[in-house]
Image (cartoon, helix red, strand yellow):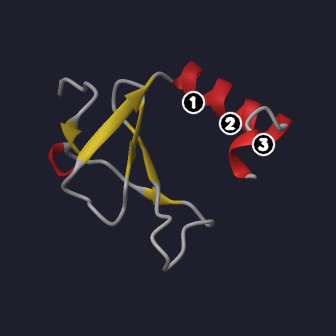
Amino acid sequence: MQQFENGIPADSITGAHWIKSGRSNQSGNCVELAQLTDGSVAVRNSRHPQGPALVYTRAEIIAFVTGAKDGDFDAFTN
């Protein structure tokens, strides 16, 4: 089984199916996620697919997405 850790080159993650955010655009705001074989989730900048991937547990991703939906991070968008 492949070992996943933060900073792993995103293009070295074998079998990953990267999903691009619908909010990504041509001005450089590009983010993609992939569910990994161990259940964790990798995040990368789609403009730099060979760059590092940040790896989070499923619980961490759920907490982040739930917080974003609840407005917990709105201060960062103003």
Q: Looking at the image, is mark 1 or mark 3 nearer the viewer?
A: 3
Q: Position of residue 9 (x, y in %)?
A: 17, 43
Instruction: Assess whether mark 1 and mark 2 are in contact (beta carbons under 8 angstroms).
Output: yes
Q: Which residue type carries mark 2?
A: Val
Instruction: Read off the residue under disc 1.
Output: 61
Label 1 environment density (alpha carbons within 10 Å; few <14, some 14–19, many ≥20): some
- Asked whether the residues under the numbered discs 1 and 3 touch, taking CB atoms below 8 Å apart as contact, a structural biologist would say no
Q: Earlier in the sequence, mark 1 or mark 3?
A: 1
Residue name at image x 26 percent, y 59 percent: 49
In the image, taking residue 71 as reference, residue 77 lies left or right, namely left
Report whether 33 appears left or right of 37. right
Secondary structure category for the residue under label 1:
helix
Reading the image, the residue beneath label 2 is 65
Comparing labels 3 and 2, the label whose residue is closer to the camera? 3
Relative to 55, say whether 74 is above or below. below
Location of residue 2 by image quarter:
top left
| Residue furthest front as drawn | 78
Question: Three-letter amino acid code at disc 1?
Answer: Ile
Question: Which quarter of the figure has residue 38?
Answer: top left
Question: What's the residue type where badge 3 is placed?
Answer: Asp
Image mark for residue 74: 3
Residue 25 lies, in percent from the top left, at: 54, 75
Dot 2 falls on a residue whose secondary structure is helix
State the residue at coordinates (62%, 65%): 23
Report the residue that reaches farthest toward the right. Answer: 70
Q: Quadrant of residue 3?
A: top left
Query: In the image, what residue occupies the spot 28% across and 28% down?
Result: 6
CA–CA distance in space, label 2 to label 1: 6 Å
